[in-house]
Image: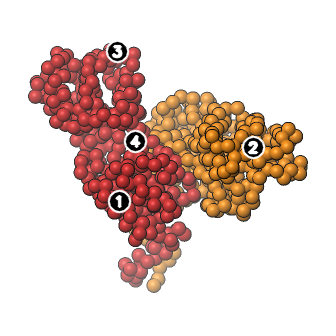
Chain colours: A orange, B red
Amino acid sequence: MKFTTVTAAAMVAALAAPAWAQDTKVIGVSIPAATHGWAGGMNFHAQEAVDRLEEVYPGLDFVLATASDAAKQVDDIEDMLATRNISALVVLPFESEPLTGPVQAVAESGAWVTVVDRGLAVEGIEDLYVAGDNSGFGTVSGEFMVSAMPEGGDIVVFRGIPTTIDNERVAGFEAAIEGSGINVLAMEHGNWNRDDSFTVMEDFLSKYDKIDAVWASDDDMAIGVLAAIEAAGRDDIQFVLGGAGMKEMIARTRDGDAMIPANVTYPPAMIATAIEMTAVGLTSTAPVSGTFVIGSVLVTQENAAEFYYADSPF
Amino acid sequence: MKFTTVTAAAMVAALAAPAWAQDTKVIGVSIPAATHGWAGGMNFHAQEAVDRLEEVYPGLDFVLATASDAAKQVDDIEDMLATRNISALVVLPFESEPLTGPVQAVAESGAWVTVVDRGLAVEGIEDLYVAGDNSGFGTVSGEFMVSAMPEGGDIVVFRGIPTTIDNERVAGFEAAIEGSGINVLAMEHGNWNRDDSFTVMEDFLSKYDKIDAVWASDDDMAIGVLAAIEAAGRDDIQFVLGGAGMKEMIARTRDGDAMIPANVTYPPAMIATAIEMTAVGLTSTAPVSGTFVIGSVLVTQENAAEFYYADSPF
């Protein structure tokens, strides 16, 4: 057989290209830069989805822009609209207010708009909204605590920055542990911050001689909590439940660390879901307008490997 | 160049097959048979999604089973679990009660479960729930009436079979027209049925000398309403708003029929969305567990062509 690689590649293209591949469509993806852990994971999963979909759909092209502030993100989106002829925009807004006008302009151009995680200041602009489930995050966390403490026990609870998100999580948690014999000794804001949570946990440890478990409700806060427990040399705390699926914490659960028996997802990979669904909308006749609330899933030693992304920074 | 078609095809497979294609995964799809209009459309879109995805993903195989009653659907699902080694099941349950046990068995086998439109009798079995938006269906319908009747006017309203679905739709509609100057002369159940709606409309026409517009809220009911208007020879009614996107009605909107200026989707193609999202879950790392509420979209002459499926029976 005699043919060159170029010829073979051309033949592959001719045989494999489905009809829709003839019109290339461009999807713009605009996200905050990887300034902290969760955002780092989000950047990783956005790039991974773009790489995967460019391979699966030769008829789709992607423009991925990351912004370290809202003004840069506004520029990115205006540029995509003006010069890249985008058919769709997937945006995780840095802030709601400054992004609302530019994203509305994209929608008015006739392009599809998918908004992820943080809503815009005006309702009804986006075709598709992909969001996490804060109430469910609290429910799943509470249900795990109940199953892990069948005889009940005394716990302390860490809250995030005072926000609707935090309120929804805590309300879900409280409803799930109601009547279970789990007693909340105290609840304080650790502000999704390691240092704040270290200080709060020091205070809890000095106040309470016996704490059975901690709902840290976030992996950054869990790391602060664990450091305080270690510094105090306390061995009464049986486990700490964080959340959001930070890589190091997922690894400890996977490896059977009794102090970190579980995690609850609030996945930065939701950006990948949003990009995938937008691609489905552009390549099929399946309707993808609406609201997708991504469930928070319990991660235990059994399934932790599925939630460990070796190449992700988060 | 000398090579046979077989050789070329083998080469294409070798070059094009991504890593995941090496493990073929089977997705079972279990749906009610095409016994009426909406179900006919649903069957069409299920087959279309399966055909499309088998082409896009060589590593996915599909088993599509249609059932004309709940007992047959139970058999189909038990068979998929016992003999087809399914990695995932997409099911639109005929009825909630009899399907709950069999679908639970699939979930307990470790397979992914996607439930569409109608929930099961036990919560928390499914990984992904894809549903229509009944409240939004009413809201979009009401908003259209308000925009089409800026001076207000007198309307009659048709309701479906008395159900939660119907209540949610009507509540959304009533909230949307509140304070708009639109006056609801009367509201009766046409039971999503042409003949019932013909009879109800005859009664409305004899009771009211002037009716400005009709919210028929469903295309089958709209057809009964239109027949009654024609039989009575009345020319006071300016338009009839149906819903669900029946092919014949979408065509009339597309073609500029002033009596059918719009439609509101409750898409049978939601089964395709469910199949597509399940495929995303099996081929990528994007999380697809959660609840996707597919939005009801306003169809007007401008976008009607997008919602007309030439080969679908519905």
Picture coordinates of residue A33, whole percent (x, y): 68, 45
Which of marks 1 and 4 precedes in the sequence?
A: 1
Query: Where, by quadrant of the figure, is residue B186 drawn?
Result: top left
Picture coordinates of residue B222, whole percent (x, y): 23, 33
Give the vertical position of B254 relative to B126 (above or below): above
Closest to the observer: B162 or B230? B162
Which of marks 3 and 4 precedes in the sequence?
A: 4
Name the residue beneath numbered marker 2: A154
Name the residue beneath numbered marker 3: B181
Residue at 25% of width from left, 30% of height from top? B189
Name the residue beneath numbered marker 1: B74
Q: Chain of mark 2?
A: A
Answer yes or no: are tags 4 and 1 on the same subunit: yes
Picture coordinates of residue B190, whole percent (x, y): 23, 32
Residue B311 left/right relative to A198: left
Label 3 to label 1, Cα distance in Å? 50 Å
Amino acid identity at mark 4: Gly
Label 1 to label 2, Cα distance in Å? 46 Å
In the rendered image, the quadrant that contains the N terminus of chain B is bottom left
Residue at 47% of width from left, 83% of height from top? A2
Callout 4–callout 3 Cβ contact below 8 Å: no
Residue at 54% of width from left, 59% of height from top? B284
Query: Where, by quadrant of the figure, is residue A184 drawn?
Result: top right
Name the residue beneath numbered marker 4: B132
Label 4 to label 1, Cα distance in Å? 24 Å
Q: Chain of mark 3?
A: B
Amino acid identity at mark 2: Asp
